[in-house]
Image: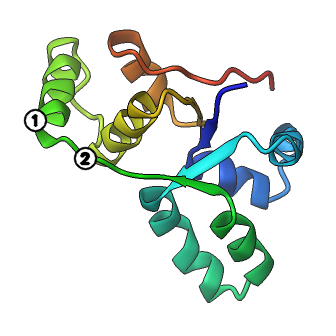
Amino acid sequence: MNNILIDSSVWIEYFRGNENFLFVNDLIISNVLCTNELILAELLPFILYKKEFDLNDLLCNIKSLEMKIKWEELRSFQLINIRNGNNNIGIPDLIIAQNCMQNKCKLLSCDKHFKIIAKFLPLEIYNYLM
């Protein structure tokens, strides 16, 4: 199985105990998960503030993908989105998508922006049933 990058939106639901995201346990056990510094930057400060050290350790022990931000490519991704009527896709989402495409991994997210991005760019979305 390819690596699966879990977006912050899914981690938040998982940490809240949302039953629809219990399958993440299986992904953790199967050792297919990965993260990146952007996602960690979104999650870890709050986790540390709440003194959730076990969650911090969990996230820090998942394979982290190197981020090779190619700004020209991001600008072209954004242009593609704008041309297709999607002018509210944020740069952080595009960076996460770019990171997945560079590393040929799937993305697991609750964020609808990634489904829009995947319509026009070769972003693989990990499908799960809820």
Identify the residue shown where x is 80% and y is 77%.
54
Q: Quadrant of the N terminus?
A: top right
The residue type indicated by label 1 comes to: Glu
Q: Splitting the image into 4 quarters, where does residue 126 fall?
A: top right
The label shown at residue 69 is 2
Which residue corresponds to the image point at 86% horizontal and 38% vertical from the top-left? 23
Residue at screen point 21% across, 26% down: 77
Q: In percent of the image, x 56 and y 46: which residue is there? A: 7
- The front one of 94 and 9 is 94
Q: Residues within 10 Å of mark 1 (few under 14, many from 20)?
A: few
Type of the residue with mark 2: Ile
Examine the rendered structure and indicate whether residue 6 appears above or below residue 82.
Answer: below
Report which residue position mark 1 lands on: 72
Percent from the top left, x then y, of residue 32? 73, 39
Where residue 11 sits: x, y (%)? 67, 53
Q: CA distance from mark 1 to mark 2?
A: 9 Å
Residue at disc 2, secondary structure:
loop
